[in-house]
Amino acid sequence: MESIVTKPMKVDFHIHSVYSKYKDEFSIVQNGNKEHINVLLKKLEINNINMCAITDHDYFSYELYDELKSYENKHGDLLKVFPGVEFSVGLKADDNTIKPVHVICIFDDSEENKKKISLIQEKIPFANNQIDYDVPGQKYFSEEKFINILREIDLNVIAIAHQKQSVSSKSAKNSKNDVSSLGEEKFNELIACEYFESFEFKNMKNGMFNINYALKNNENYDQIRFITGSDCHDWSVYPKHDSKENSKLEFYFTYLKCLPTFRGLAMAFSDMRRISTNNNLFTPRSKILDSIQVNIDNKDYDIKLSPGINVIIGDNSIGKSLLLHKITNYEYIQDKKIIDGYENYLNDNKIKVNTKLDKSNIHTFDYQGSIRDKFSKDKQDNSKFLKEKFPEDLNKEIYKMKIMTAFNDLFDYLENKFDYDDKYRELISLTMVDEEVVSKNLSAKKIGVNKTDIKKATKLKNYYEAIIAKIDENYNLIEDNLEKKTIDEFKVKLLEFSEKYGLLNKKATKVYNVKTSMNNGIANYTKQIASWKNELETTKSKFETEDSINLSNTISDLVKLRLNKKLLSFDNINEKIEPSVLSFGEYLFVKKFKNCTSINDEYIKSVLNRVFKDNAKFDIERITEDELKSMIRNYGDSNVAPLDVLKIKIDNIIDDDLEPLPSITLHGNNVYSKLSSGMNSSIYFDILSTDQREGIYIVDQPEDDISQNSIKSNVLNNFKTMSYGRQIIMITHNPQFVVNLDADNVICIIKDENDDICVKSGALEYVDKADNVDILDTVAKSLDGGIESIQKRWKRYEKNFSFNKR
């Protein structure tokens, strides 16, 4: 027999035979006898059944059981046949009436129990060729009689209650022989006291409701479990009940994660996660370590590993941590002195570790104390762990561009307003000269000059170049040829526009420079002839050559500025910024901006409020440049224009507001600070368990960083969830991580009576008497609290399970 669980067991513990004739119609079960055992064997083979039991109504045929059992490991996939009986038991319902419930009892088939198994039927009352029920006029035993029968049989037993209807069905109380027919109060009472190991159903439609009920009502998956049973009465149509059953009704078998032993069966029925109606208990995984090969004093150990949870236990300072570091080539140790110490220990104890695990196959290695270090305030080594869980940052540049579009309108408005104010003051300062003066000297008028065309062409050229740069930034990510073609065509147009405004910019700049040069020449000429004129001629000449031009230009500019003045409003700006979110289980990993959730009038005003002094009144229609300067908080260099200072401060505020802000939320509460300000291992394992990235998880003594309450309430379930898709190799001294975790494989490194190091391994339920291996017994001896943990695990059986205490 395998020492660890490598594949799930397909089971059916509800098969009837001819010995159900005492309660069922004989014509249906008449061929269910020893002479027709090949019919049943063929059906079991076709359906790949690994473990089964014939459970007749209140009757046990040792002869038929022994015949079927003789085919274990010899026919098809059949590995285990258990002795069993389907008892009819009267239980008190909520209304105080007694109702019959069918209870399947599976008994311990260990070799030492063979004599007791052969006597099972002798303990069940039978007289005058019929079952002798103790309840007058009824075909069921009283609860007291049922318990007394089990006591007399004196075998460890697993009780499975019949639950044909779904638990939540309104008609369940009227269903025949169902536990739920007793009423909700009694049903919940039986669950709470763990009267039954499991509840059996057949119809998958009802099963879905049952499983949903279990998920809602289970606490840590350890109270209510459901399995399926065929309830087959006619072997020729297995797994159907009989030939009259609806041919379209598909039956779903149950798979159990256990070794094919009674102890394995008992362990499987103590945890819902070991039970499934789909063959999905072991999901495929590519990164896995099949075994660890070690030689100790010339004795070879090939330690098989489960694809699920492997725990390493044993004596202190015996080399458990060393083993993990050695197979990982000391990749996770920085201190050479520790490595040298490990190597010396291996040499001194004649140990050779012949297995190497490449780092690329490892998801995470949490060596002893590293979980605490990851989230300590001093070390903060959680960035790598958390970074891959978060979504990409929001595109800061795009949102800043959208915000700046609104502020650029404001800047243009103010620039226009201040230019208008300047021109207006300039108009007032100009002097009109109307005397008739005949100039005795020649004079020349200056040419009007401005930078309007240059500014416009420059802005548009930069605008198109910025779009092209943005296109080029992630162009290499585009794989679709049609997309590339469209983008290329668009880019060609943008380049045309950029070149167009580049030429216009050069042209406008050339014209500006020519006019400026001509005006400089006129100014020099005017200076040279100024001494030849009298005062009135000079004034008149200045007016005609400069001031009249300035006057006309100023009036023209004022008209243009007035015409260009627009009503400024941000009411039509309203864009909500949705955060980026990735979910890991119930956790949401969020990236959002530090202080900007929407681009709207409210946000624009909030930015301005942070620029301006308290109680400053920003009247955009009337504000002057000097007033703007006086309003700005912490103005700084007085030589910088107020509008430029405003732009710089607003730009800095927006940059700060758009800083990416990570958060991790659970049920609406942000728990990120708990991770970043100090280690919170329960959150760590919650997140780790939902991470789908492949690779082996190695962890050394996680209990050092977790409270006992956290282990029980959260972390055990995290590890069970993790094991569905990832191999786990763990060192622990805590029995909860062995017994309550339902470890798939326990590796015990201990010293024998000769003080020599030896290794024992296998599933929790594994026993090999020939090699003196009993994993549960070893756990009980090796771990403080191990005996108590196992006894709690077995509390529902109240049978003879015991351990050899140290």
Image (cartoon, rainbow, N blue to C red):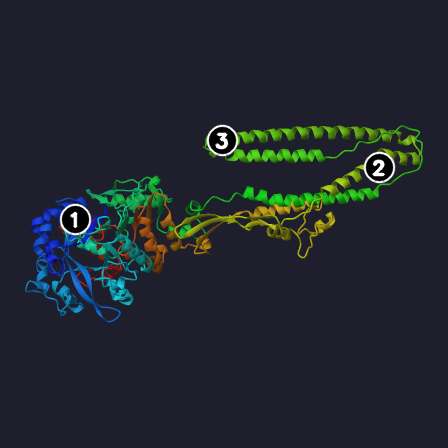
Image position, residue 96 (x, y; %): 24, 71
The amino acid type found where label 2 is placed reads Asp
Location of residue 211 (image quadrant): bottom left
Image position, residue 332 (x, y; %): 36, 44
Element under disc 3 = helix
Q: Does residue 803 show up?
A: no
Residue nearer the viewer, 46 or 336: 46
Element under disc 2 = helix
Image position, residue 749 (x, y; %): 24, 50
Location of residue 505 (image quadrant): top right
Name the residue that disc number 3 marks: 484
Q: Does residue 572 show up?
A: yes
Check the image and name the residue furthest to the left: 128
Whether pointer 3 and pointer 2 mark residues with C-beta atoms closer than 8 Å, the reply is no
Residue nearer the viewer, 337 or 658: 658
The amino acid type found where label 1 is placed reads Val
> What is the spatial separation of the Cα atoms under label 3 and label 2, in whole angstroms?
58 Å
Name the residue that disc number 2 marks: 547
The amino acid type found where label 3 is placed reads Lys
Which tag is nearer the camera, tag 1 or tag 3?
1
Element under disc 1 = helix
Name the residue that disc number 1 marks: 237
Pointer 1 or 3: first along the chain: 1
